[in-house]
Amino acid sequence: MRRTSARTKTGKALAVATAVAAVAGFTAWQSAAAETASQPGITAGSAVGYGAGTTGGAGGSTVTVSNATDFIKAVTSSSATTVQVNGTINLSSMQKVASNKTIVGVGTSGKITGSGLNVASVSNVIIQNLTFTGSNDDAINVQYSTKVWIDHNDISNAYDGATDVKRASDNVTVSWNHYHNQDKNCLLGHSDDNGSEDIGHLHVTYHHNWFDGTVQRNPRVRFGNPVHVYNNYFNNNSGYGVASTENAGVLVEGNYFENVDDPYHLGEADSGPGSLVARNNKLVNSGSGQTGGSVSTPSYNYSLDSADSVKSIVTGGSGVGHI
């Protein structure tokens, strides 16, 4: 959420139920009629990393929405729901999302503008295949929440953070997103004095994201250990790439940095240093980065792409329309 800046894949297609609004007075999200269909761009797949096992709205109803009123009703429903966004949803303020939700764009048509999504004090949420632009706050804020997967979105021009994860949140994967036209990008851990809540939490995996000219916080990490940043493409990041602060432990692995003077470092502004281990990265016209300390080994299996191939893989597969 709003604060002062310190500095500047692809799962197997699932069959899903599509709600049919056939009764007068019922909105699309209320319709109980459904048919089974496989639709391009309507699939959750499965998360890799700390967000693995997040199922979102699987097993519940499926609804299709195209306006803010129906969208808000669907994402705040108390039951498991897959919310298919077909059109532009204009929000006036940060919209709370309830537990057990998949919010997924249809093809390339799903857009969130005006404000963003607040994933607060909930569990089991998937946000996928959506274009977020022009939020008056964060694009996506995650706090006091577990099991969150943010995947294959296009995110730009948020007033504050693009994707912030904070306040004891845990078991989150941020994958295959295209971030651009953004200053403060991915904050992990909101303040230096929140260790009592955050220590032992904030386990997040960032993989196959395109940090496309985003200035800083790609991510900026406090307290989380380990945090895994692997197989991302960083290009033209004028501030810095990754910062490890406040005793965090960050593994920066198999990434491609291009035209990034400061790819990764320890400490940031008034925040003390964390630990950072860098291995198997490709640095093209970029600085050497700063490392130090030790980092715990991520507690999951993953397949690492060669850093040489990351640029083409990520630019060809990140963002909307690629799930």
Image: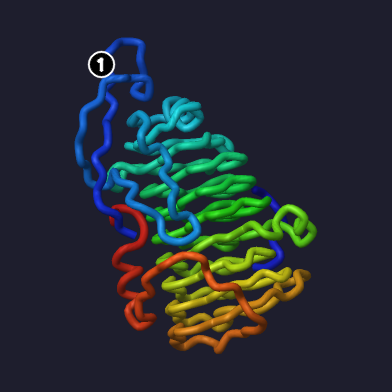
Residue 280 relative to residue 248: left or right? left
Figure quadrant of residue 119: top right
- What residue is pinned by disc 1? 22
Please tell me which residue lies in front, 222 or 3: 222
Across and down, in percent, residue 190 comes to 69, 56
Determine whether the residue tagged by mark 1 lies in a helix, strand or loop: loop
Compared to residue 199, the image places residue 282 above or below, namely below
**Residue at the image point whose x is 67% and y is 82% from the top:** 293
Across and down, in percent, residue 3 comes to 70, 53
Mark 1: amino acid: Ala
Q: Can you see residue 223? A: yes
Across and down, in percent, residue 43 comes to 30, 46
Please tell me which residue lies in front, 269 or 91: 269
Residue 183 relative to residue 222: left or right? left
Compared to residue 131, the image places residue 99 above or below, namely above
Q: Can you see residue 217? A: no
Crowding at mark 1 (Cα within 10 Å: few <14, some 14-19, many 20+) = few
